[in-house]
């Protein structure tokens, strides 16, 4: 943890109970007050043709399973005013990025709806952790709609606002000197999100585009083509519900990013241990062609998820700051989900050599597996082909080829 910051203003909603959200993981044992942690989706399940964000917030619930707004780590109903969860220095140490820099390249984040406080919240995160400011006035941070305008932004949405904060913070953690372009689609439909991706790809200086959302595995070639952007690293979350493939991660032009559990371990040379996260999505697409660079190791005739991975388990989660109160939660929170790993990996690509070498991002990574930490333990469920859901040496579904060990594979 770093120096304290001023508490965010808490609305009257901060003390109400909400029954929202699907529990997706077990938490700590209940305290004497009957409160305990639970990991909850902040976006609802998507309708056909739409996507849901893959952010998981570590919440506090009472003995009946009802969400308790603004419960702090000591399980009192007070807002958390200092960050919990992994911060930039820890993440860059875990993935051996401490000497890496981008030279001022731009990472684009594509999400649905508007986060009204995105610029201010981003800089609260960055100042708290000692990162340089990234403001609109300096040209470091830009927010536009899917048509490229800085005005006429979409309607605000609390769940997607938290997703956006997670994305901005994790790009900052991975790549402190990167510029950031936030492209907000007017809805969570794949047609609008695809339009936002195309706009991001056309923006000057963008080298990587992160997409922390997904829907059912899709064979829509028109939508898939929007995510095929030669010369740029397009990353996408594999999902948070365990074994099962989702788009856009299954699109051939996308680097599918899975998830791990990351913990400190002084007994190993790296200083950290990693295993496949039980919630990480993975699988074999039913529709999308196998990229030429994916080998027979996937045992899949079409596109296989994941390609690479990074921390995603909310129980070993990351610090996020968001001041747009949603379900009574505001300020510092702990998040996970493959929504964390996708923007982080996009930030790593911005610091690597994949794109300057002339290789596509996915091909470069698959040709440099020795520059990754191979994750060999853990599982995300049951599946017809063991490698699709059980971690092991080499490629596996939940973690792909592994996690960053510096930028050599990016």
Image (tube, rainbow, N blue to C red):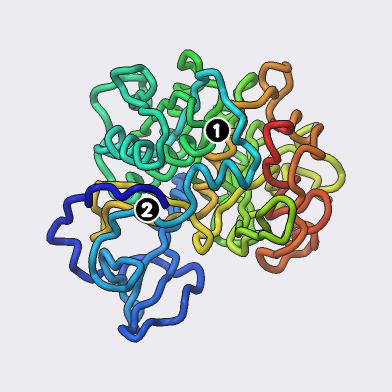
Foreground: 129 or 215?
129
The reply, left or right, for residue 116 in relation to residue 98 is left
Contact check, label 2 and label 1, Cβ < 8 Å:
no
User: What's the distance in space between the residues labelled 2 and 1, CA to CA?
Assistant: 21 Å
Secondary structure found at label 2: loop
State the residue at coordinates (47%, 76%). 28
The mark tally for this picture is 2
Q: Position of residue 146 (x, y in %)?
A: 38, 26
In the picture shown, does residue 140 fall above or below 28?
Answer: above
Question: Residue under circle 2?
Answer: 83
Quadrant showing the C terminus? top right
Question: Which class describes the residues within 10 Å of circle 1: few (<14), some (14-19), or many (20+)?
Answer: many
Q: Position of residue 167 (x, y in %)?
A: 44, 41
Secondary structure found at label 1: helix
The reply, left or right, for residue 139 in relation to residue 352 is left
In the picture shown, does residue 409 fall above or below 9?
Answer: above
State the residue at coordinates (53%, 60%). 316
Mark identifier at residue 32: none
Q: Earlier in the sequence, mark 2 or mark 1?
A: 2
Mark identifier at residue 347: 1
Report whether residue 44 is seen: no
């Amino acid at each position: 943890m770093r120096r304290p910051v001023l508490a965010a203003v808490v609305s009257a909603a901060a003390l109400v109970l909400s029954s929202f959200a699907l529990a997706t993981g077990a938490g700590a044992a209940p305290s004497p007050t009957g409160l305990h942690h639970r990991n909850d989706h902040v976006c609802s399940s998507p309708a056909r043709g739409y996507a849901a964000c893959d952010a998981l917030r570590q919440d506090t619930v009472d003995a009946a399973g009802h969400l308790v707004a603004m419960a702090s780590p000591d399980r009192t109903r007070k807002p958390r005013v200092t960050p919990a969860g992994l911060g930039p220095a820890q993440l860059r140490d875990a993935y051996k990025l401490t000497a890496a820099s981008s030279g001022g390249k731009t990472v684009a984040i594509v999400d649905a709806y508007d986060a009204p406080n995105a610029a201010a919240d981003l800089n609260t995160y960055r100042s708290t952790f000692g990162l340089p400011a990234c403001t609109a006035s300096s040209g470091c941070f830009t927010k536009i709609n899917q048509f490229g305008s800085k005005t006429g932004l979409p309607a605000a949405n609390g769940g997607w606002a938290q997703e956006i904060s997670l994305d901005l913070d994790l790009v900052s953690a991975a790549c402190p000197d990167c510029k950031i372009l936030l492209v907000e689609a007017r809805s969570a439909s794949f047609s609008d999100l695809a339009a936002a991706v195309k706009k991001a790809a056309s923006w000057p200086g963008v080298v990587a585009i992160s997409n922390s959302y997904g829907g059912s595995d899709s064979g829509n070639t028109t939508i898939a083509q929007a995510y095929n952007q030669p010369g740029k690293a397009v990353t996408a979350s594999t999902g948070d519900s365990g074994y099962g493939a989702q788009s856009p991660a299954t699109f051939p032009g996308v680097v599918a990013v899975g998830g791990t559990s990351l913990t400190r371990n002084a007994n190993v040379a790296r200083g950290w241990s990693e295993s496949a996260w039980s919630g990480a999505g993975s699988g074999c697409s039913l529709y999308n062609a196998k990229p030429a660079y994916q080998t027979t190791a996937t045992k899949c005739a079409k596109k296989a998820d994941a390609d690479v991975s990074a921390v995603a388990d909310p129980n070993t989660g990351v610090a996020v700051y968001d001041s747009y109160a949603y379900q009574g939660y505001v300020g510092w929170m702990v998040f996970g989900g493959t929504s964390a790993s996708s923007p982080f990996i996009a930030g790593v690509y911005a610091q690597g050599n994949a794109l300057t070498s002339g290789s596509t991002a996915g091909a470069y990574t698959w040709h440099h597996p020795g520059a990754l930490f191979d994750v060999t333990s853990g599982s995300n469920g049951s599946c017809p082909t063991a490698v699709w859901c059980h971690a092991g040496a080499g490629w596996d579904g939940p973690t792909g080829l592994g996690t960053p060990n510096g930028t050599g594979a990016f």
